[in-house]
Amino acid sequence: MGVFFFGMGFSSLAAARAIHQIIDSGIPIAGTTRTEEGIEALADCPYRLHLFDGESPGKTLAADLRRATHVVLSIPPTEAGDPALRMHRADLDAANDLEWLCYYSTVGVYGDFGGAWIDESAPTRPINQRSAHRVEVEQQWRDYAQERGVPLLVLRLAGIYGPGRSAFDKLREGTARRIVKPGQVFNRIHVEDIGRVTALAAQRKLAGTFNLADNEPAPPQDLIAYAARQMGVAVPPDVPFEEADMTPMARSFYSDNKRVSNRAIRDALGIDLLYPTYREGLGAIGKVPA
């Protein structure tokens, strides 16, 4: 087994660690980062890293990619499609031992359901270009996997958080705001759950399209209030959504309101999440020194 990650970021690093912890610490792992600084920041990790900015082909990654049996794709798409598939399809084609593909997508592909519960049977009706591109690229990878005759797992991820990227960090930085839009809820997913699910799915070569979200979608202001109480600091005041000063991208997230079920992936792998709600997830993060 050899694993290659296109986009060795927050989620991929968690998956790489989980593969070594759950399957075998000797599995060779390689991946890409967008910048030389990214490679330098990971200089002490046990993975082979290559520069790939998504604008031009990576000059050094071909050999590792062609040796891979498992490939995980974690690069956001552009209007032109998936950078990995567009620029390195020939290298993927030459990966003669390829056994499994995994694409990290987003629950944003579903669009708005007015706060109702949905599962993987729900139609995709994205309401922004970012999510529309995800729908297109999901299908591109399904087509490629079918052509190659290899299983493909599409993981539709909820909002990702974890150590260094949580409500605690926003509170410490003074950027946390309790923006209140009545009835609005979001699912989240702890990065360690992404890592564990990826490792288990890779081990079993799980195929299909699955949601990966927590058990309890919740209003975003509740998360901030809970984290503030855990830290023993003042809870930020409510800010009505209509009055909030937000970037267009941040505001667009509030256009999607749904409760995403994770039952299918839990049943497929026979597991529960490590952090089924934000309370367990933040509780674990809170034990990590700032």
Image (cartoon, grey):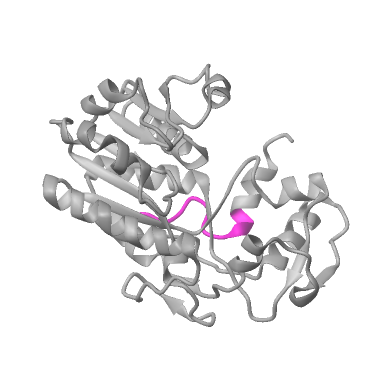
Residue at 32% x, 44% y: name it. 200
Q: Which residues are magenta?
A: 271-280
The tally of labels here is: 0
- Say if residue 69 shows up in the picture: no
Of 233 and 87, which appears nearest the observer?
Answer: 87
* Residue 69, percent from left and from top: 21, 32
* Residue 212, percent from left and from top: 42, 58
- Say if residue 229 shows up in the picture: yes
The quarter of the image holding the N terminus is: top left
Q: Is residue 160 above or below residue 45?
A: below
Q: Is residue 261 magenta?
A: no
Of 15 and 243, which appears nearest the observer?
Answer: 243
Residue at 36% x, 30% y: name it. 57
Q: Quadrant of residue 178?
A: bottom right
* Residue 25, percent from left and from top: 36, 23
Residue at 59% x, 45% y: name it. 162
Q: Quadrant of residue 278?
A: bottom right
The quarter of the image holding the C terminus is: top right
Of 40 and 233, which appears nearest the observer?
Answer: 40
* Residue 251, percent from left and from top: 65, 67
> In the picture provided, is 28 more to the left or to the right than 230?
left
> In the picture provided, is 156 more to the left or to the right than 164?
left
Q: Is residue 272 magenta?
A: yes
Q: Is residue 205 above or below residue 184?
A: above
Q: Is residue 75 above or below residue 216?
A: above
Q: Main secondary structure of the magenta part?
A: loop
> In the picture provided, is 174 more to the left or to the right than 66?
right
